[in-house]
Amino acid sequence: METKQKDAGTPILVTGGAGFIGSNFVLEWLAAGKGPVVNLDKLTYAGNHENLVTVEESPAYTFIHGDICDAALVKGLLEKHRPRAVVHFAAESHVDRSIHGPEAFLRTNIDGTFTLLQAARAYFGSLTGEERDGFRFLHVSTDEVYGTLEPEDPAFHEETPYAPNSPYAASKAASDHLVRAWVHTYGLPAMITNCSNNYGPYQFPEKLIPLMIANARKGKPLPVYGDGQQVRDWLYVTDHCRALMTVLERGQVGETYNVGGGNQRSNLEVVTTLCALLDELSPESPLKPHKQLITYVADRPGHDRRYAIDARKLEGELGWRAQESFETGLRKTVEWYLANTAWVGSVTSGAYQQWVKQNYGTREGIAAEETR
Ligand code: NAD
Ligand code: TYD
């Protein structure tokens, strides 16, 4: 189903633009006046068109409700809208869900990327002149393809060998390899970005930060997996979106760029910082101190211990810099969730409760001393 006409100017085609990072990207792109956007999204449990309510009526925005695995749909969209770029976000993105049900991950992340690449290749083959020179395919990927780091290991760089450990990471690694092969074999002008953990507005409350905020607000346990000493390298979502725009504008075809903010934190540090922010920003809350809600639960199978990103290539060659520190970004994020309780309510009804039961119902709470 397609709604609305496109505005004048050459559009980009975004996939998965109703998800967390995709919707932030679409909003940033339109606010910056970079031209029209065509958004193809299947609206899975993770896609929420409410995220884009402020641009819904904009003549520069077109929404297509559909699946990236639908080859005829994707082909038709490229031929009709003639985008200057494809920015590919659409994916199944949650590690815990990939452990419970990997099939959807293989379908969307691998088959879907394959379908998109084939369609983009045919479309690119039909272009000439400036349209052909300017066309780009930007594949949005993750640092999880590199596997896990020991505490003293250097951060992941673009030459780090792939060693994915979860079904999610393996499916993203496969999709990266497909993109690489389509550049090398067919000359598709594609680029890949591998980014660290994002956080910020519109993140679905199955991921660590929004889940902890949502649970804390309700006085529910804050389920820390294992010993809580796993390290992630956090990046505010808007900084990621700006990095993607930078790569789209100035990146070299065939190159990979790692994206990260240099904010390594253990999960326990993240959760205790969140609790302190909630104490400060909701001083009347009877749940204070929120850290009393922290509960250690059984670990995630195959849990990667540490991720860290070396973003010097993106910074040095393309001049990108993260603008938010972890402290400023986290504060903005908590403030956003406190101001948008209706959004949280609307995405945590129905199927979400099923997921909570499936993922947490079988995780026995474990005493803190057992994790040390
Ligand atoms: P998300 O789960 O919030 O959103 C995914 C979006 O894709 C949803 O809108 C969903 O409806 C859509 N989608 C899923 N399957 C589809 C299909 N078959 N056809 C069309 N649309 C489909 O994900 P996110 O966190 O916004 O991540 C976006 C991309 O960025 C993913 O490719 C992910 O691997 C990558 N990434 C995410 C992070 C992170 O921390 N969230 C970090 C690095 C990279
Ligand atoms: P998550 O947000 O799922 O991102 P990823 O697995 O892609 O890094 O999880 C971030 C970290 O937080 C990860 O080490 C797992 C941990 N975690 C918990 O401890 N409890 C939770 O309830 C969740 C969802 C994650």
Image (cartoon, rainbow, N blue to C red):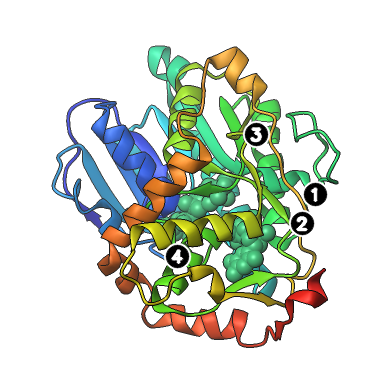
Q: Are marks 4 and 1 in contact (CB under 8 Å)?
A: no
Identity, as a three-letter code, of the amino acid under mark 2: Asp
The circle drawn on residue 148 is 1
> Can residue 103 be seen here?
no
Tell me the CA gap for discs 2 and 3.
29 Å
Tell me the CA gap for discs 2 and 4.
23 Å
Identity, as a three-letter code, of the amino acid under mark 3: Trp
Residue 302 located left or right of residue 266: right
Mark 2 closeness class: few <14, some 14–19, many ≥20 residues within 10 Å:
some
Task: Pick whichever of labels 4 and 1 is earlier in the sequence.
Answer: 1
Identity, as a three-letter code, of the amino acid under mark 4: Ile
Residue 77 spot, x, y in % from top left: 35, 44
The circle drawn on residue 304 is 2
- Identify whether 112 is placed above or below 96: above
The circle drawn on residue 213 is 4
Q: Which residue is mark 3?
A: 182
Residue 135 spot, x, y in % from top left: 45, 23
Residue at position x 40%, y 78% in the image: 218
